[in-house]
Image (cartoon, rainbow, N blue to C red):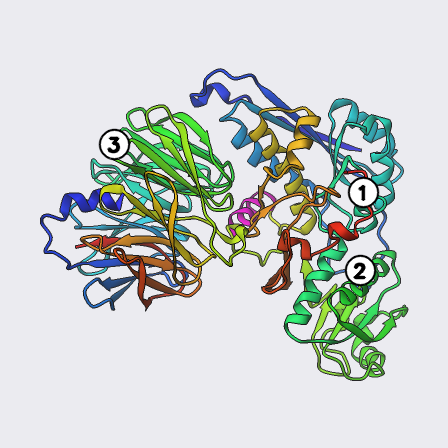
Amino acid sequence: MKNFTQYSVLFCTCFGMSAQADVALDVTYLSVFEAQPPTLSNLDAEPDDIGVAGALTGLDDNITTGRFLGHNYALNVVQLDDGDDAIAAAKTALAASPYLILDAPPAMLLAIADLPEAADAILFNTSSGDLDLRDSACRANLLHTLPSDKMRTDALAQFFLTRRWDDLVMITGTHPQDVTYAEAMRSSLIKFGLELSGEKTWEFDADMRRAASQEIPLFTQDLGDYDVMILADELHDFGRYVLYNTWEARPVAGSEGLTAVTWSPVIEQWGAAQLQSRFEDKNARDMTSQDYAAWAAIRTLGEAVTRTNAADSATLRDYILSPEFELAGFKGRPLTFRSWNGQLRQPIAIAHPRALVAQAPLDGFLHQVNELDTLGLDQPESNCEVFQ
Amino acid sequence: MIRTLLLSTCLAAPAYAGEIWVTNEKDDTVSVISTETLEVIATYPTGERPRGITFSKDFSVVYICASDSDAVQVMDPNTGEILHDLPSGEDPEQFVLHPNDRHLYIANEDDAITTVVDTETRAVIAQIDVGVEPEGMAVSPDGKIAITTSETTNMAHWIDTETQELFANTLVDSRPRHAEFVKDGEQMWVSSEIGGSITVFNTADQAELGKIRFEVPGVHQDRVQPVGFEFIEGDTHAFVALGPSNHVAVVNADTLEVEDYILVGRRVWHMAFNADKTQLFTTNGVSGDVTVIDVASREPLQSIKVGRFPWGAAFRP
């Protein structure tokens, strides 16, 4: 277990503020070890501080703001190794503070949320797009700053519809994440009146670094003609070899090619360039979606403390879920939480590795309450009741 | 800021003649527009990513924030020649010239610092820690108070210009972008881009007097994002750029009510008046043009194509 703490420093007297009761917010970032299956390519080296680096960037933002108000922030980072007891670590963290930012698989998120020690806590899911966590398995103490898979697939479906790409095919991998992504995509296509004209499952175990040019054309030949090929390959295993090797010359979207993502280095509008450069200067790498979700979680807490001048979880939770709350998240619109399931509403970037192509919700997708609710689970279809 | 400059020079300038200088953020140029012909009469190269722009009191030099060059450039407006750079701290975005015509207060967006530079000695005389992503800058007409707004900290920071220290920090709505002193410095206004509001402060005690909100028909509330604003003669009304809603609002400065919305180009950002404040020139970043508004009728007159992503605007006679 790696455990380190960033302490904020008391600045409040140096900045000409009148004496104010000090408010201190301690947060734990807990990442639970999750073994990932091997992928065909060795190109992507996963940084070991994914998420953590985003949380630390958010902490710096909070500290800078807090020093003008007599508010202090600290982040305790706990990264578990294989075999460490996650529940014990969560209990220890909850004994120290009710604020927990979690990087964990869905089952572990629920196990931690259901601990008696977590009853009055505020937990943030920053790692899982699982729709069930926002639906029938939702927990009143679990907020989600990472979009659901469905928000991302709805974004792509809106884009397909806008471009009138309505003849779609999909290739799905066999990992659970691929399957849930494919399910989300199918439901998004139904929601926006689109259809799949063909589907295949990728089950090959050949090494595509040698054989892609021979294998993929044949594999995609029997899908016939279509407008776009969708890939459900959330672990980035085979998808990268599909591009430019399909039988028909057609664009690829989904997990590779044109992707719908929470965050991407190609986002530079809406002041995002400043957040990107703050992050890159400190970490010498690009900011990922999970970093963004962790950043948004700690900034959510910071914003609530700033506006309420309080640090108790009941006050902060009420404020975060109220209409008064808004987070400036460098996405061009104020971000708010869905008060019925704890999901952070946010625009979704539709991007390729070199540029932002569009931002969902796209023009013309209207909603009676908030256009951002055209993405993901909307209130009338939600089975989450514990927020009522 | 531009307003105070105007007051001091209008008398000397021949009526109606003048130029609007526009920085083109993604072209590394400034475009010079004639307020008589409403045409671009000159384009000069600048440092990288020019944003804030302002003239010295006598209009003999123009200061330009070249953000990605980490410098404030001093240009001869008659020739377009860069005379020299001023030290500015990292990533200068916006600045304001103190009424003493010497001290530039510069927001360093990447560093959470406001830098004060003496334009004569070309030395940094103070650096003040402010909130994350400082942007909006203003200075009171009497020169005693400077303001920095910080976009991520969501505050207006009040700086005592004698000690160069903060004496107050006031919260505003999300992403404050621009600040102006109004009514001889009695009030200070701050626009909040993501919050969609302008907060009006009483300068004497920094108390909040009121808030202005905007509703553009047919545009979702989230896209109504106030950024730059300027006041007409007598400070009775403010013209407020509303960013990606592509409108400029006309606000009654006494009742704080919005009286009109004027359709302009895409992502309207900052603005400047002509000599007698009968025409207003708005920079429209996404459409790459400047809209000319007739102030009396509150109608857009025409668009003028400039460079890519026009950002700041300043008038010179």
Is residue A263 at all visible to an observer of this figure?
no
Q: Residues within 10 Å of mark 3 (few under 14, many from 20)?
A: some
> Could you tell me which residue is drawn at 82 percent across and 79 percent down?
A220
As drawn, the label of residue B6 is none
**Gap between marks 1 and 3 measured at Cα:** 54 Å
Which residue is identified by label 1? A104
What is the magenta range?
A272-283
> Could you tell me which residue is drawn at 32 percent across and 25 percent down?
B204
Q: Tell me the mark number nearer the camera, choosing from 1 and 3.
A: 3
**Gap between marks 3 and 2 measured at Cα:** 59 Å
Q: In this orientation, which residue lies closer to the viewer: A254 or A6?
A: A254
Are the two marked residues, 2 and 1, in contact with CB atoms closer than 8 angstroms?
no
| Residue A275 colored in magenta in the image | yes
Task: Return the x and y of residue B191 as percentages of the image width and height.
Answer: 42, 42
Q: Give the mark nearest the N terminus, 2 or 1.
A: 1
Secondary structure of the residue carrying numbered label 3: loop
Which residue is identified by label 3? B143
Task: Return the x and y of residue A92 as percentages of the image width and height.
Answer: 81, 25
Chain name for mark 2: A
Amino acid type of the residue that numbered disc 1 sits on in the rendered structure: Ala
Q: Is residue A193 above or below residue B198?
A: below
Q: Tell me the mark number nearer the camera, choosing from 3 and 2.
A: 2
Q: Are marks 1 and 3 on the same chain?
A: no
Task: Return the x and y of residue B262 as percentages of the image width and height.
Answer: 37, 58
Secondary structure of the residue carrying numbered label 2: helix
Q: Is residue B39 above or below residue B204?
A: below
Q: Are marks 2 and 1 on the same chain?
A: yes
Secondary structure of the residue carrying numbered label 1: loop
